[in-house]
Image (cartoon, helix red, strand yellow):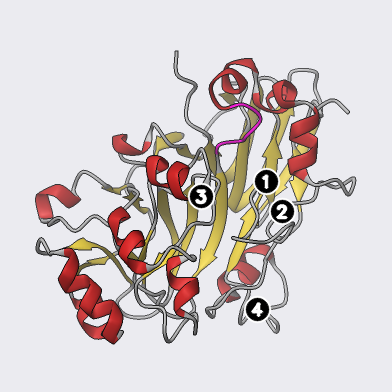
Amino acid sequence: MSAPSAPLRLPANQPAQFYRGGSAIAALRGASSSCADFGPEDWVASTTTLFGRDTDGLSRLPDGRWLRDAVEADPVGWLGREHVDAYGSSTALLVKLLDAGQRLPVHFHPDDAFARRHFDSHFGKTEAWIVVGTQGTAPTVYAGFRDALDTRTIRDWVVDQDAPTMLGALNALPVEVGDTVHIPAGLPHAIGEGVFVVELQQPTDFSLTLEWRDFLGDEKKGHLGLGFDTALRALDTSAWDEERLTSVIRRTATDDAPAVDLLAPAARPFFRADRLRPTAPLALDPSFAVLVVLAGRGCLRTVNGEAQQLSTGDTWVVPYAAGELELDGDVTVIRCRPPAPRR
């Protein structure tokens, strides 16, 4: 079946997780939060499964098909010829709404080379966070060790499950709405309680969790069956000082341009994200994309005149076959895209 020629609105897709959260997602979508304690992640337009699962995490299209299967059936229609030449039938992207109802554990992700060697995957898990909401008096994320460390020291912390020391070794970064943080593969990190983000990442579920005991309850889930001696080879143990951190953080709250490039330049080989607030009809070039409507109401038109009405809390998947689109209205949209195909 060919890819559709217009964007498709997607329902919520919240696979069960090990940590609390979800009320901010429910509020954005205008849904009941009564059962949201362990729905902290909404996987939007996902062709990725949870680690070790067959279908958990996959998104369904309105016609009932898995998006994964639809893309496999017509990769050029969904993704474009240049994308397929570069990345095959993978969307090369996973987008999540992530609402941390409690602090996440200290963890890190493998890069492409490590994932290829140990997980038989073309992709590791570089990611980025776009802060779209906060609760509490001091919303904070954590990224990178403040001082260079040796692997033996970190291994001792993991053996002892010394969570205070692990967290204390990281840079604590206060955040507000509009801030974005690029998290390269290998960088140790955590998201603090009360931080609500749109997360872009490579399309895998490879999380290596140093602080596993009070979250996962099983050491094997922390190292994904590799053993920590192997897993720690993927960890960035170098020092990240304030100057180095500026290369991964952007503050965009005061930028009121109709289209704002949200992520640090280092993220571009992995994914792209723009905040769209049209002051006049805004042209969007053909691309596979995921849209998250943060506020307002608007209209998305195709070149053949088909119109889709957007409103707060909507999530949409845009196939390449939809062609050039026009966005208009009093609306704020986060547009997430795979990396531009290499030429």
Between marks 4 and 2, how big is the CA–CA gap? Answer: 19 Å
The tag earlier along the polypeptide, 2 or 1, is 1
For the point 67% across and 46% down, the residue is: 47
Between marks 2 and 3, how big is the CA–CA gap? Answer: 19 Å
Q: Position of residue 21 (x, y in %)?
A: 55, 77
Q: Amino acid at mark 3?
A: Phe
Q: What residue did someone put label 3 on? A: 119
User: Marks 4 and 2: which is nearer the front?
Assistant: 2
Q: Main secondary structure of the magenta part?
A: loop
Q: Is residue 226 left or right of residue 85?
A: left
The tag earlier along the polypeptide, 4 or 1, is 4
User: Marks 2 and 3: which is nearer the front?
Assistant: 3
**CB atoms at circles 2 and 1 under 8 Å apart?**
yes
For the point 57% across and 47% down, the residue is: 94
**CB atoms at circles 4 and 1 under 8 Å apart?**
no
Q: Position of residue 227 (x, y in %)?
A: 40, 67
User: Is residue 262 visible in this depiction of the protein?
Assistant: no
Q: What residue did someone put label 4 on? A: 36
Q: What residue did someone put label 2 on? A: 58
Residue 1 lies within the magenta run: no
Crowding around mark 1 (Cα neighbors within 10 Å: few <14, some 14 to 19, many 20+) is many
In this rendering, the answer to whether 219 lies above or below 146 is: below
Q: What residue did someone put label 1 on? A: 47
Highlighted magenta segment, given as a residue range: 88-92
Between marks 2 and 1, how big is the CA–CA gap? Answer: 5 Å
What secondary structure is found at the residue carrying circle 2?
A: loop
Residue 73 occupies which quadrant of the picture? Answer: top right
Q: Amino acid at mark 2?
A: Leu
* Along the viewing direction, whichever of 24 and 95 lies nearer the viewer: 95
Task: Point out which mark residue 210 bears.
Answer: none
Q: Position of residue 6 (x, y in %)?
A: 78, 30
